[in-house]
Amino acid sequence: MNQLKEKIMKILTPHQLMCLATLTKEGKPWVRYVTGEAPDDETIRIATFSNSRKVAQIQNNPEVHITCGFTIPEQSRGYLQIAGTAQVSNSEEDRNLCWHDGLKEYFKGPDDPLYSVIFVHPYRIEYMGPGAMKPEVWEPTRN
């Protein structure tokens, strides 16, 4: 793994607060806080309610943007700007894969019909390191 990818994965690995932007039917941006992680690769997993506004917006237009990483101003660490496409899954396998005890506050369990998982597949990640004046850019290799 190259150094940039290591920096990105260091930020994406812990479960954390993120800002997720979707587009309304009118094409207007809509941003909200979500929690997510990418424990195995750069695919970001976000738990959500099946009937949420974000699910409807993603089903209408899968283009999303995520900002994450910088949480405490006194700690100088990098942050990410992520452009990607999202998909919503209600499969038993995906819901079990993403389930963690913190979700018990919102859902009855991984089989709760209101529980869905959003997968965000990045096509561009900008890493902005401490003191940097311009971002380092990661884009997946195309086959």
Image (cartoon, rainbow, N blue to C red):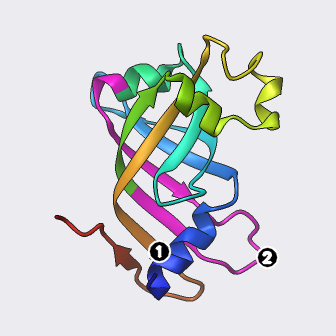
Mark 2 vs mark 1: which is more N-terminal?
2
Residue 20 horizontal/vertical position (percent)? 51, 43
Numbered circle sitting on residue 127: 1
For the residues marked 2 and 1, what is the alpha-carbon distance in whole angstroms? 19 Å
Q: Amino acid at mark 1?
A: Tyr
Residue of label 2: 74
- Secondary structure, mark 1, is strand
Residue 133 horizontal/vertical position (percent)? 45, 86
Residue 51 vs residue 63: left or right?
Answer: right
**Residue 62's quadrant in the figure?**
top left
Is 103 or 17 nearer to us in this picture? 103
Residue 7 in view in this figure: yes
Q: Amino acid at mark 2?
A: Glu
Residue 27 vs residue 50: left or right?
Answer: left
Residue 110 vs residue 85: left or right?
Answer: right
**Residue 135's quadrant in the figure?**
bottom left
Residue 24 in view in this figure: no
Select label 2 or label 1 by which is in front. Answer: 1
Residue depicted at 55% across the width and 82% down the height: 129
Residue 37 horizontal/vertical position (percent)? 61, 52
Residue depicted at 79% across the width and 76% down the height: 74
